[in-house]
Every structure is written in C-alpha cells, then in structure tokens.
Image (tube, rainbow, N blue to C red):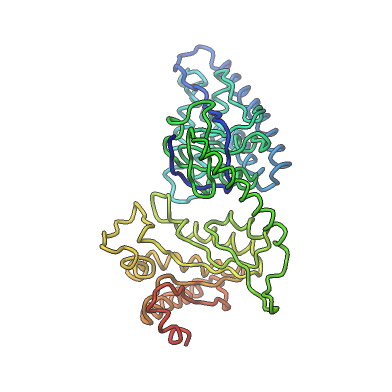
Amino acid sequence: MTQLQGIAASSGIAIAKVYRLEAPDLSFDKKDIDQPEQEVKRLHEALDTSKSELEKIKEHTRKSLGDEHAEIFSAHLLVLSDPELIQPIEDKIKSENVNAEAALSETANMFIDMFKGMDNEYMRERAADIQDVTKRVMAHLLGVTFPDPALINEEVVIVADDLTPSDTAQLNKQYVKGFTTDIGGRTSHSAIMARSLEIPAVVGTKNITSQAGKDTMIIVDGINGDVIIDPSEDQIAEYKQKQDDFEKQKQEWAKLKDEATVTSEGDHVELVANIGTPDDVEGVLNNGGEGVGLYRTEFLYMGKSQLPTEEEQFDAYSSVLKQMGDKPVVVRTLDIGGDKELDYLDLPEEMNPFLGYRAIRLCLERDDIFRVQLRALLRASVHGNLKIMFPMIATLEEFRQAKAILDEERANLKEEGHDVSDEIEVGMMVEIPATAVIARQFAK
C-alpha cells in the first residue's frame, strides 16, 4: 500500500483499478525537404483533421456540460485558424526547407514561451491552449493515435501526468469513476469540468504515474485529497462505506436545497457559501445559496510566479459579482502568512507564523499589494452587492488604517473617472480572542 497526498479538485470517492492514460510519443527528426509545398499540404491536412475532431468534442461538451465549457474548444479552434500562428509555420517550411513537424514544433514553442512570460494571467493561460492543440496537430502529422478516453468501457480510475480539457470532456462517468494526476490545480479547466461531471479527482500528486501500475486497485478521495495505491481489503471496505455515506449526504442535500432556511421558531437563517474562485459560483447558485459569505481571495495569489495584476483581480471579482447578481458577496482581503505562503514573496520566518506577520499586518506593511487589491475590488463593486472584510484585525488602529487606505483608493479612482459603488459595507473577521472582547468598540 502506498498513500499520496494531492489537491482535492472534485469531491467524492472513487475505488477501481488503474487505467493509465499515457500521452503518445511525439518525437520526430528534423529533416531537410525539397518539396515545401507538399509539407504545407501535410500541415493543412493535419490542421483540418484536428479541427474536425475538436468540433465533435465541442458539440459533445455542449450537450453534456453546457455552452460555457464548450467555449474552451471554441478557443482551441480559433488557435488552429489563427494566421498569426499558421503563417509563420508555413514561412518556416518554405524559407528553411524543413519538414512540417519541425516548423510546427519550433513555431509553437516560440508562442508558448512568449505567452508564458506575459503579465496577464488570461494570456498566460493561452500557452496551455496552444500546447494542447498543437500536440493534436503533431500527432496527425506523425500518424500517431491519441488515446481516446471515450472508448473506456469498464470501471476505472484514470492515472495521468495531466488531463487536457479535451481528455476530460470525453470522460464517461458511467465507467470513469475518478482520476488523479501528477500536476494540475483546482482551477484548471480539467478540475472545473470534473466538478461539473461530478467525477472525483485529486490532482498535483507529483508522482502518481511512477507509483501506480496498470490494473492496480486504487482509491481516490476527492474530499480530502488522498490517493491510496494497492489498498488493503479493510481500506477498501472503509472507503466504500465513506462513498455510500457521501452519496447519501448528497441526496439529502439535494432534497433541502430549495427549502427555506428557518429555525423551528420561524427565524430566517442566511445560508451563504465559502468560495475560492469564480468557478465556484455555479455550485452556490445550483445549490440554493443566498450569497457568498466568504470569498477567499488568496487563491488568486497562490500557485503563481508573481502577484496578480489589478486587471486580473478586477476580472475575477467582477465575474463573481455579476454571477451572483444582487445577492451579497463578502470578499475577504488577502490573508497570507501562517500556513499560506507565496514563493515569490520573501516573508520572514517567525516562531508563531499564525499570529505574526500575516493577513492585515502584512497588507498594512506592504500597502502597495493591498492598494492594488482594493482598487480592483472598488472598481468591481458596480457589478453586484459587494461587502469587504479585513482578516486578522487585532486592534482598533489596524481597522482604522485599513479603512483609511480603502477610502484613499476610493477617492483616487473617482478622480480618475472610475465608477465606484457607494453601498459597500466594510467589516472585519473576528478571529482573535482580544478582538472578540472589545467587539462593541469595533461595532461603533
């Protein structure tokens, strides 16, 4: 038995044998050619075949997951028709007399590196789109067949280095009981699709592919992020019970989701959700949520190589507010430090990091980071019912300082001509004992 820990990407428990979804060998030799027009023709044949496949995957995704997820493949199809990508490949074939494989690889890698180096997160994500679609084209140039998850016809858990959106969109939940990968995160396209398909998933295990052999029994715990390879009979029995309990709980929740949340005395209790990304909003709305009680914004900062820009944050906050309409959205400002570290911020080590240089103390000290977030929130405020909450406030002075910076940035934005809502409620998270003792003073 081997147990690995990854990122819980889609809730649920899967128990089945391993199906290794392995990428095909796309290695090739760079060759000099004397018929460049023939190579250009080969290129376009591979492009057309890839487009045809993606159109089918897009339509399948539209029927099974809806238009929003299908748009991923609209973006992929645009890449394959983009003259900014295709023309340089043709030019390289003709000017350097190289085969289509070499021209495709070199040109695609140039664009991938360029997009990866951009400041804007949306543009950085386009690197993965280019990589995904050009691999498909390369496979057709080489005459290599991509593994097709849609052909799986027995109960399995997929083990892979990573799953592309096109892989995930073709999963049949009747047979694919779960998946686990070496890399990936909770906000990847594949993780989001897995949640929509309700397929348990654990990603980012780092080395599942080197540990789990074909047909080995495996347990994927998408609730806690655990993966157990070659479990004992007792472990299988334990997790089957957890699986049954989870399914029963889901059925009970489904019955209650549209019921009024009131006490036995008839008092209404607000039922709101905790979220970490804009993609979590769908679950809030589908399950009868009355709002967002805590939007943990630190997820915007984690898993990156640099701080998110004001525009990236504005896009995320606006998306959540627009989706929630007039329902309240309580956004907690950046809460890092303690157990939540950012590799690109050189934070000092402390004896007790949970009570030291973190959350609001860090933001007041590094107000350049704080102000960018507040500007993005204030600009987004016109798109919904925004409420702002400061974390780890310990003193009245910290609360006053945070509110003063918020007011300064509100004034700055209005002077710059931006619209800002005048109805934003501002509060704090009471999580320090000393704060609870003087709560009345904060309320004033």
Residue occupying image coordinates x 54% and y 77%: 425
Residue occupying image coordinates x 51% and y 28%: 216
Residue 139 left/right relative to 52: left
Residue 17: x %, y % from top left = 56, 31
Q: In which quarter of the image is the N terminus?
A: top left
Residue 347 or residue 240, whichever sits in front = 240
Q: Identify the residue at the far top of this view.
A: 34
Residue occupying image coordinates x 58% and y 68%: 329
Reply above or below: 204 against 25. Answer: below
Reply above or below: 298 against 97. Answer: below
Residue 267: x %, y % from top left = 67, 78
Reply above or below: 214 against 262. Answer: above
Residue occupying image coordinates x 58% and y 56%: 280
Residue 302: x %, y % from top left = 43, 53
Residue 406: x %, y % from top left = 45, 75
Reply above or below: 249 against 422. Answer: above
Q: Identify the residue at the far front of this view.
A: 234
